[in-house]
Image: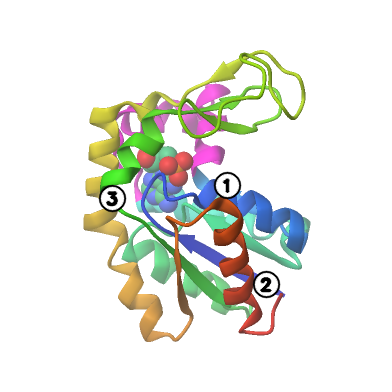
Amino acid sequence: MTRLILLGPPGAGKGTQAKRLSASLGIPQLSTGDMLRAEVKASSALGLKVKAVMDAGKLVSDDILIDLIAHRIDQPDCRKGFILDGFPRSLPQAEALDRMLGERKAKIDRVIELKVDVEALVERIVGRFTCTKCGAGYHDKFHRPKKDGVCDQCGGTEFARRADDKEEKVRTRLDAYTAETAPLLPYYKGRGVLATVDGMASMDAVTRQMSQAIGTVGVA
Ligand code: AMP
């Protein structure tokens, strides 16, 4: 059983690393950002409710997120564990998660902090884009497709950028991280489950450090 949380500011590489760990550990990546974006795209009642807040780069209310995750972790694919990417993002969310897991006789095994240089984040975020067909991630400067306009993974030719990846929205999201999410680091440190990895290292090196951090609790 492996229940993991990835913590770090927007652009730290949580999504990229969660996808890699998900493939190697065989447990799902639960990205609350992806779930909410899917609701917005489908114009569901929830999507309509959260769209403006997300577009502004602000945090959606705790009760919405807690409901979303409570429902998701009861799905059969989470039986062997899961990787939380983007949740919890505030102390009330972390406390609700502890309660939820406690009721299920479960707990978080490891929280991995991706530590990054905040100045580098804006550049990382504003340049990123993904293939709309397979979700592969690219970057204008650091990781262009081998052939311009064609996805390396699936050959798709359509790409998308997130509405909240514009510079002024990124600044708001970084402020939200500092104010609401950073206090989770001492919270999990106090529980003895926090591991910190250098998020500025190469993607492969980060993956290796994360696997080690998971291995040290004997859950990998
Ligand atoms: P992300 O893809 O993780 O950067 O999330 C994109 C946006 O979704 C955030 O800027 C928030 O508006 C919203 N969001 C995702 N997860 C949460 C959460 N746990 N709490 C509050 N808002 C969230």
Residue 220 lies, with reference to residue 42, above or below; the image says below
Q: Quadrant where the N terminus lies? A: bottom right
Q: Residues within 10 Å of mark 1 (few under 14, many from 20)?
A: some
Displayed-image quarter of ligand 1:
top left
In the image, is the residue at mark 2 within 8 Å of ligand 1 by its beta carbon?
Answer: no
Q: Amino acid at mark 1?
A: Thr
Q: Amino acid at mark 3?
A: Val
Query: Where residue 72 sits in the image (x, y, percent)?
Result: 63, 53
Q: Amino acid at mark 2?
A: Thr
Res 108 visible: no
Q: At 31% across and 54% down in the image, what residue appears?
A: 117
Query: Where residue 44 sits in the image (x, y, percent)?
Result: 54, 26
Viewer-nearest of discs 3 and 2: 3
**Residue labelled with disc 3:** 118
Residue 178 lies, with reference to residue 194, above or below; the image says above
Q: Contact, CB < 8 Å: mark 1 with mark 2?
A: no
Q: CA distance from mark 1 to mark 3?
A: 18 Å
Image quadrant assignment for residue 210: bottom right
Q: Which mark is residue 16?
A: 1
Colour convention:
rainbow
Q: Nearer the viewer, residue 92 or 170?
A: 170
Q: Earlier in the sequence, mark 3 or mark 2?
A: 2
What span is colored magenta in the figure?
Answer: 33-61
Q: At 74% across and 63% down in the image, what residue appears?
A: 25
**Residue labelled with disc 2:** 2
Q: Earlier in the sequence, mark 1 or mark 3?
A: 1
Query: Where residue 170 sits in the image (x, y, percent)?
Result: 29, 36
Say how many tags the image has: 3
Helix, strand or loop status at disc 2: strand
